[in-house]
Image (tube, rainbow, N blue to C red):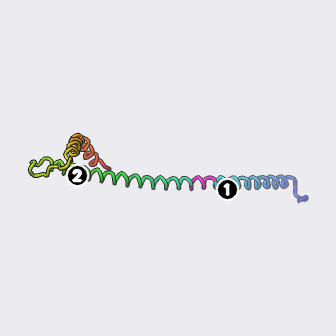
Amino acid sequence: MRSLPSEDKARIGQLIKVLAQERRDKEAFKKELGVQSAKLQNLEREHETARQQEHALVSRVSRSLCLLREYQRELRTRGRAEAQPPGDIDEPRDGAADVARPIAAAQGAAEPARRRLDMAAWEEP
């Protein structure tokens, strides 16, 4: 090494500095890669959790819509039964009339809401 000209020694020194800098950069990039990898894993877990929650909510909404439709059918069936002549339907006994009247009134009041629900069912995506 002593026999090398000073220009070559300077070049070798510069190359050693560059090599050391490259090693430091490599270590920094490895650390950054680890950080980014951990962030990605967290985001993937959050995405999966959100997807599961979305699926659960869609299932709940679907079940709720089915129950609402079933209830609407029941209300329509009751409405048709109430529209028949009085002789065709057994009259409520043992105080049941006191309960049946408010229910029938509530059903009549719920008619506009029922129509809105019927329309909403047609607007599903």
Residue placed most toward the observer, 78 or 2: 78
User: Which residue carries the number 2 mark?
Assistant: 74
Which is nearer the eye, 44 or 16? 44
Closest to the observer, 34 or 73: 73
User: In the image, which residues are magenta?
Assistant: 35-41
- The kind of residue tagged 1 is Lys
97 with respect to 17 (left or right): left
Q: Is residue 24 visible?
A: yes
Q: Position of residue 121 (x, y in %)?
A: 28, 48
Task: Give the residue displayed 83% in from the left and 52% down from the top.
Answer: 10
- The residue wearing badge 1 is 30
Percent of width and height locating residue 49 = 49, 54
Q: Is residue 65 left or right of residue 26?
A: left
Badge 2, how many Cα within 10 Å: few under 14, some, many 20+?
Answer: few
- Residue 61 covered by magenta stretch: no
Q: Position of residue 40 (x, y in %)?
A: 57, 54
Q: Disc 2 residue type?
A: Glu
Q: Quadrant of the N terminus?
A: bottom right
